[in-house]
Image (cartoon, helix red, strand yellow):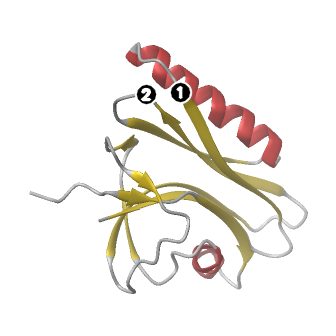
């Protein structure tokens, strides 16, 4: 059985690269998770998990991460990525991820609506929403990335 994460942070960054993969990697580096191995997870923040904005994760670690990303090679195109965490009073949280060809403001509006819907569907009271989003105008090959890395 895998351990349950106890800490998390929320991050968003964008970058250019010479290829789709290096644009993605450069965005990860700017988001402070470029030297770890992401394990993509779905959308539940474990109960009691604490926000740690200064969290340092050892290089090479396997890190459960909910994320959204988009890469584009269309110069001048605006791309955005966002994550949001909905927190309840006494239970688990819900994480939503989004990426698309839109502005940061549009991504924030979409992601906030997704969290509200998730709580309505679960019939849980929503205490707070935390959002991280980024917008990027592509020069050659760009990536927008937003994530919630979780750690032990």
| 114 horizontally vs 51: left or right | right
Element class at badge 2: loop
| 21 horizontally vs 102: left or right | left
Bin the neighbour count of mark 2 within 10 Å (Cα to Cα): few under 14, some 14-19, many 20 and up.
few
Residue 26, image x and y in percent?
64, 80
Q: Residue at the location (65% across, 81% down)?
A: 19
Q: Whole-Å distance between the Cαs marked 2 and 1?
A: 6 Å
Q: Are marks 2 and 1 in contact (CB under 8 Å)?
A: yes
Q: Earlier in the sequence, mark 2 or mark 1?
A: 2
Q: Residue at the location (60% across, 61% down)?
A: 11
Marking on residue 89: 2
Residue 85, image x and y in percent?
52, 41
- For label 1, the residue is 127
Residue 13, image x and y in percent?
68, 66
> Looking at the rendering, in which quadrant would you find the N terminus?
bottom left
Res. 102 visible in picture:
no
């Amino acid at each position: 059985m895998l351990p349950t994460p106890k800490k998390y942070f929320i991050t968003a960054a964008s970058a250019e690269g010479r290829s789709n993969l290096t644009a993605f990697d450069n965005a990860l580096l700017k988001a402070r998770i470029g030297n770890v191995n992401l394990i993509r997870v779905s959308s539940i923040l474990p109960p009691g998990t604490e926000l740690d904005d200064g969290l340092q994760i050892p290089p090479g670690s396997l890190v459960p991460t909910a994320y959204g990303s988009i890469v584009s090679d269309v110069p001048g195109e605006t791309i955005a990525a966002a994550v949001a965490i909905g927190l309840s009073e006494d239970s688990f949280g819900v994480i939503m991820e989004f990426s698309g060809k839109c502005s940061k403001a549009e991504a924030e509006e979409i992601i906030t609506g997704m969290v509200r819907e998730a709580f309505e569907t679960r019939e849980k009271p929503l205490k707070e929403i935390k959002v991280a989003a980024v917008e990027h105008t592509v020069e050659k090959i760009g990536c927008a990335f937003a994530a919630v890395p979780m750690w032990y």
